[in-house]
Image (tube, rainbow, N blue to C red):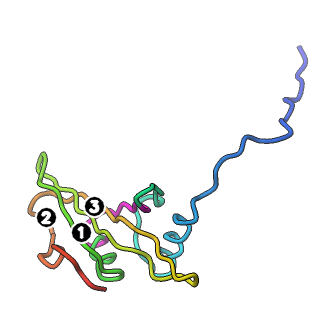
Amino acid sequence: MGTQPIPMPLRIAHAPGPMPETTAVDAVIDYLNLPATRPPIGREDGVHVIVRDGDQFARWVHALGGEVQHSQPLGGAALWSLRTETPRRADDSTVRVWVHVTLVAGEFAPSGFRGAVSA
């Protein structure tokens, strides 16, 4: 039994590249040395970033400011979200960024995280 090479298609199916918004958030993460547990996720409402704990969440709050929201605890944990944006780019545009962390009820969550926070 002989083997034959597998023919390569002339064109590989187009895999969409990263959204420009996601690339902008990646640049901010690198430039400001901000934490992210996984690669940013681009969606219509902005780019979502997941962080590991309250300390990492605090770094985003202090670096970019924004509005902090949190859900009611469910099963002993609450989702905290920071709605912020990238610094203005050369074309004067910004990218909406959502930073999320799940905290156990009563875990480190400074009162300063509630409401709007300036950078």
Q: Residue at x 71, y 45 (%)?
A: 14
Q: Please name the residue that numbered disc 3 is placed on.
A: 101
Q: Please name the residue that numbered disc 2 is placed on.
A: 107
User: How far apart are labels 3 and 2 at the CA level?
Assistant: 12 Å
User: How far apart are labels 1 and 2 at the CA level?
Assistant: 8 Å
Q: Position of residue 55 (x, y in %)?
A: 26, 73
> Is residue 53 magenta-colored?
yes
The residue range painted magenta reads 46-56
User: Left or right: where does residue 104 sit relative to residue 52?
Assistant: left
Element marked by disc 2: loop
Q: Please name the residue that numbered disc 1 is placed on.
A: 54
Q: Position of residue 85 (x, y in %)?
A: 40, 74
Q: Residues within 10 Å of mark 1 (few under 14, many from 20)?
A: some
User: Left or right: where does residue 76 sit relative to residue 49?
Assistant: left
Q: Nearer the viewer, mark 3 or mark 2?
A: 3
- Contact, CB < 8 Å: mark 3 with mark 1? yes
User: How far apart are labels 3 and 1 at the CA level?
Assistant: 7 Å
